[in-house]
Image (tube, rainbow, N blue to C red):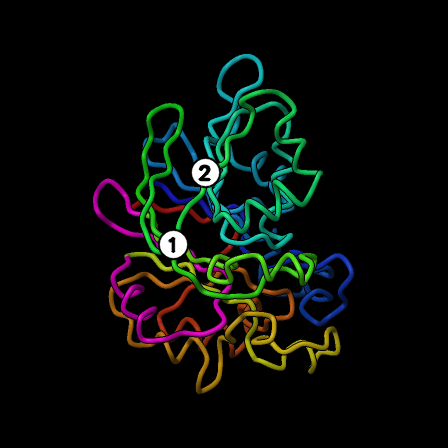
């Protein structure tokens, strides 16, 4: 299975268009020892022909154009993208679907709750079905396995992990009460034909023993690296919420992901979905050095590997 990281930043990308934090200032003036990043987006493929997207970022069109294997190969309108697996209904994870509305057949895999939010409650996403058989929706369960299956016969076995119980703020309270909270935010574990496993968890509010066990059975772990500390946005005066209040366990601290995941021996460990304020984006800084010394990598756009 081939895995391509098309984007590695959190919402807004890096530098973020309206932010003047030190990271963004240094990125714009060329003094940062680090790289610009688009919003988190991963693509996987088993047969090098049919690709599946893990979510659909707002930067998706640019990311596709920057990735030759995702370009159309024949005359006319066609695409090697066979499907999209959604881990939540967050705008950062679904807005890119609207860039795929150009009469291209593909399949969307998501929980029934996410499908109801997008397909039933939001008329914009009706543009994905302007003609018959344009986009098909497939419900997936939080407690079972399923298969990503392309029109060309490609198959990737997957399972999901329920990680959070809060739906996006644009979902009305009345509608949220009608939905299954276990379906709000997911992690994905995809298995290659060789039996190796990729875990993609871009938003993790907490780590328990059950999650640790599942992650230690994977070979590559793409894990929530949004914030370095819980108070990051407050300290930099660019927000009023704590990291955990936003559904993201911080990287640092006695109860942060760096320490809680220190015992994982099997997977290659990579932080993804990194916010523009996170100091580990500075490859000359102590935070980046601490991450690397602990055996972790920080994802960047264009990184790819095979399982």
Near mark 2 (Cα within 10 A), the count class, few <14, some 14-19 or many ≥20, is: some
Q: Is residue 302 visible?
A: no
Locate residue 244: give its quadrant: bottom right
Q: Nearer the viewer, residue 281 or 150?
A: 150
Q: Residue 160: which numbered mark, if any?
A: 1
Toward the left, the furthest residue is: 194
* Inter-mark Cα distance, 1 to 2: 14 Å
**Residue visible at 45% across and 31% down in the picture:** 82
Locate residue 194: give its quadrant: top left
Residue 217 lies in the magenta stretch: yes
Q: Nearer the viewer, residue 230 or 69?
A: 230
Relative placement, left or right, of 67 versus 240 is: left
Relative placement, left or right, of 139 versus 283 is: left
Toward the bottom, the furthest residue is: 254
Q: Residue under circle 2?
A: 138
Where residue 77 appears, as percent x and y from the top left, is: 57, 18
Magenta stretch: give its range: 191-218
User: Which of disc 2 and disc 1 is earlier in sequence?
Assistant: 2
């Amino acid at each position: 299975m081939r895995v391509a990281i098309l984007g590695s930043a959190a919402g807004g990308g890096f530098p973020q268009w309206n932010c003047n934090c030190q990271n963004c200032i240094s990125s714009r003036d060329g003094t940062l020892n680090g790289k610009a990043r688009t919003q988190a987006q991963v693509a996987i493929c088993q047969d090098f022909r049919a690709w599946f997207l893990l979510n659909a970022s707002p930067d998706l069109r640019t990311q596709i154009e920057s990735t030759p294997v995702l370009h159309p190969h024949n005359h006319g309108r066609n695409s090697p993208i066979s499907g999209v697996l959604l881990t939540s209904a967050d705008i950062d994870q679904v807005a890119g679907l609207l860039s795929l509305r150009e009469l291209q057949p593909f399949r969307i895999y998501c929980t029934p709750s996410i499908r109801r939010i997008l397909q039933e409650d939001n008329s914009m996403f009706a543009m994905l079905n302007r003609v018959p058989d344009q986009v098909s929706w497939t419900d997936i369960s939080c407690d079972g396995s399923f298969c990503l299956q392309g029109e060309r016969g490609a198959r990737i076995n997957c399972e999901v992990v329920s990680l959070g119980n809060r739906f996006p703020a644009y979902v009305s309270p009345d509608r949220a009460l009608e939905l299954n909270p276990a379906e709000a935010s997911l992690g994905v574990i995809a298995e290659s034909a060789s039996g190796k496993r990729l875990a993609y968890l871009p938003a993790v509010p907490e780590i328990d023993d059950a999650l640790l066990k599942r992650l230690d059975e994977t070979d590559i772990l793409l894990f929530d690296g949004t914030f370095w500390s819980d108070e990051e946005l407050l300290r930099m005066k660019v927000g009023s919420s704590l990291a955990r209040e936003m559904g993201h366990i911080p990287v640092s601290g006695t109860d942060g992901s760096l320490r809680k995941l220190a015992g994982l021996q099997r997977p290659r460990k990579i932080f993804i979905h990194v916010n523009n304020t996170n100091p580990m984006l500075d490859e000359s800084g102590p935070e980046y050095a601490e991450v690397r010394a602990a055996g972790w990598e920080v994802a960047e756009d264009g990184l790819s590997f095979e399982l």
